[in-house]
Amino acid sequence: IPLWFKNRLMWGPVFLASAFSTGTAAIQLVLALRGKGEQSSLEKLERAHMTSLVAEAALLGVSLVRLGRAGNLLTKGKWSTLFWPGVVGMGLIVPLVLGMARGEPGRGRQFFSALCTLIGGLSLRACLVYGGKTSADEAHTYLEITSK
C-alpha cells in the first residue's frame, strides 16, 4: 500500500498524536455536556488538547512532505475533499483557533472545539485507511515505490 509504505516511520507518531488529541477532546466533550469540572482542571485539559493538536499538525505536515507525489491523493486527489475540510479545517484549524481565543474557555466553545477534533480524527483515519486502498490501485504511485 504505497500511501502507508512511503511514510511508514511517521504514521505511528501521527496516529499517536491524533489519539491523544481525540482522547482529550472526548473528555472535554463529556465534561462540557455534564457541566462539571473545576476550572483549573479544564484549563489543564485545554492546554493538553492544544499541545496535542500542534504536535499532530506538525507530524502531519512532515508526513505530507515525506510522501511526495504519493501524498497528492490526500491533498489534490480523490480524498482531498475530506482531507482539507475534515482533517485540516475541522480537525486542526478550528480547534486551534478556538483554543487561542481570549477569555475563559466557556463550555460551548469547549464543546464545539472537542466535537470538531473528534470529526477531524475520524476524517484522518478514513482518509488514511481508504486513501491507502486507493493508492494501491494507482499504477504510477505503486510503480514509484516498487521500482526502487
Image (cartoon, rainbow, N blue to C red):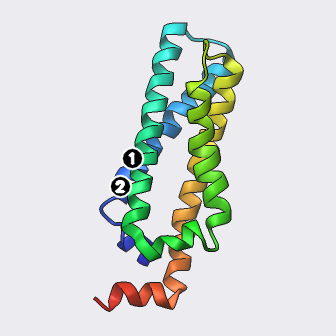
The amino acid at mark 2 is Gly
Q: Could you classify mark 2 by the number of other residues whose Cα lies within 10 Å: few (under 14), some (14-19), or many (20 or more)?
A: few
Q: Could you classify mark 1 by the number of other residues whose Cα lies within 10 Å: few (under 14), some (14-19), or many (20 or more)?
A: some
Point out residue 129 in the picture as x, y percentages from the top left corner. 52, 66
**Any mark on residue 140, and which?**
none
Horizontal side of residue 136 vs 12, given as left or right? right
The amino acid at mark 1 is Leu
Query: Image quadrant of residue 44?
Result: top left
Point out residue 78 in the picture as x, y percentages from the top left corner. 64, 73
| Residue annotated with mark 1 | 16
Residue toward you, 31 or 65: 65
Q: Could one spot residue 33 in this view of the protein?
A: no
Q: Is mark 2 on a helix, strand or loop?
A: helix
Query: Image quadrant of residue 56?
Result: top left
| Residue annotated with mark 2 | 12
Q: Which residue is drawn at 39% across and 51% down?
A: 59
Point out residue 53 in the picture as x, y percentages from the top left corner. 48, 39
Q: Residue at x 55, y 27 (%)?
A: 27
Q: Could one spot residue 72 in this view of the protein?
A: yes
Q: Which residue is drawn at 56% across and 66% down?
A: 75
Query: Do the CB atoms of the residues marked 2 and 1 lie less than 8 Å apart?
Result: yes
Residue toward you, 130 or 81: 81
